[in-house]
């Protein structure tokens, strides 16, 4: 609510059923735009139904997973409301895995010509650092505010070091407390973990 205003361009990475997408749409209004990335076709259909019911025409759904390279990847839908990209280029087929298209933020903005984000919400079940690496140029150039949900200690550290290298600082969503050590992760209480908002140095 604090960092999104009318006319902004918001990206929702891992839009799911649209809880954040709908809120972002209300915040940016008719003069803004929301791009909702959701590769799970069943969940995306429900998301699009929610958008239609609420007449949120400023939202464009994107049926792709955001990663560090464009192409295809295995996606594991472990439950009706969750899923994640599978590490590596191959995966054993199963009842819960299928292939999805992937895209990078740099490609989406710099090659395809979509509006760059002023705000991004990233909740993609452990693929946060891959999405950030694939958007390094966009993030460095446009200095988006980032709301990130971190999922494991390895991602904590990699994401923190990536953002620190681009001149970002991070605060905890729940308390507003500044993250003291962005190069460390859980269980270091002063490190990156949980829900954080990453702010460019000028913000």
Image (cartoon, grey):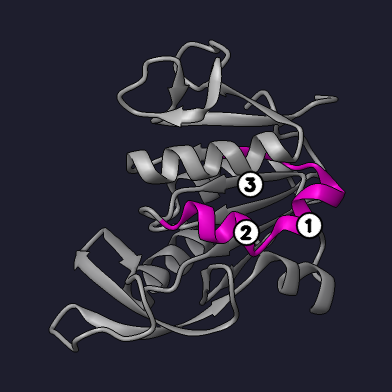
Image height of 83 relative to 8, above or below:
below
Residue at 43% x, 63% y: name it.
Answer: 47
- Identify the element where label 1 is drawn: helix
Residue at 77% x, 44% y: name it.
Answer: 118
Q: To which residue does mark 1 refer?
A: 138
Mark 3 touches mark 1? (CB < 8 Å): no
Q: Locate the N terminus by quadrant.
A: top right
Q: To which residue does mark 3 refer?
A: 120
User: At which x and y percent is residue 108?
Assistant: 72, 72
Image height of 109 relative to 198, above or below:
below
User: At which x and y percent is residue 66?
Assistant: 55, 67
| Residue 129 painted magenta | yes
Mark 3 or 1, nearer chain start: 3
Real-space Cα separation, disc 3 to disc 1, in angstroms: 12 Å
User: At which x and y percent is residue 152?
Assistant: 32, 42
Magenta stretch prevailing secondary structure: helix
Q: Is residue 36 visible?
A: yes
Give left or right: position of 96 versus 172: left
Image height of 95 relative to 164, above or below:
below
**Nearest the eye: 143 or 184:** 184
- Identify the element where label 2 is drawn: helix
């Amino acid at each position: 609510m604090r960092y999104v205003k009318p006319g902004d361009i918001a990206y929702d990475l891992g839009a799911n059923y649209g809880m954040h997408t709908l809120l972002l749409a209300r915040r940016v209004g008719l003069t803004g735009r929301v791009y909702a990335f959701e590769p799970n076709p069943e969940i995306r259909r429900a998301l699009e139904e929610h958008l239609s019911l609420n007449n949120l025409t400023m939202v464009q759904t994107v049926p792709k997973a955001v990663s560090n390279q464009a192409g295809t990847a295995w996606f594991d839908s472990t439950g009706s409301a969750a899923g994640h990209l599978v590490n590596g280029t191959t995966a054993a087929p199963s009842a819960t895995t299928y292939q999805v298209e992937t895209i990078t933020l740099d490609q989406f903005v710099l090659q395809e010509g979509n509006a760059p984000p002023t705000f991004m919400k990233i909740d993609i079940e452990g693929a946060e650092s891959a999405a950030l690496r694939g958007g390094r140029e966009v993030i460095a150039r446009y200095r988006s505010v980032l709301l990130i949900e971190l999922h494991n200690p390895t991602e904590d550290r990699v994401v923190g070091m990536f953002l620190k290298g681009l001149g970002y600082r991070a605060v905890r969503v729940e308390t507003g407390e500044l993250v003291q050590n962005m190069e460390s992760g859980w269980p270091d209480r002063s490190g990156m973990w949980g829900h954080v908002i990453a702010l460019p140095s000028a913000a």
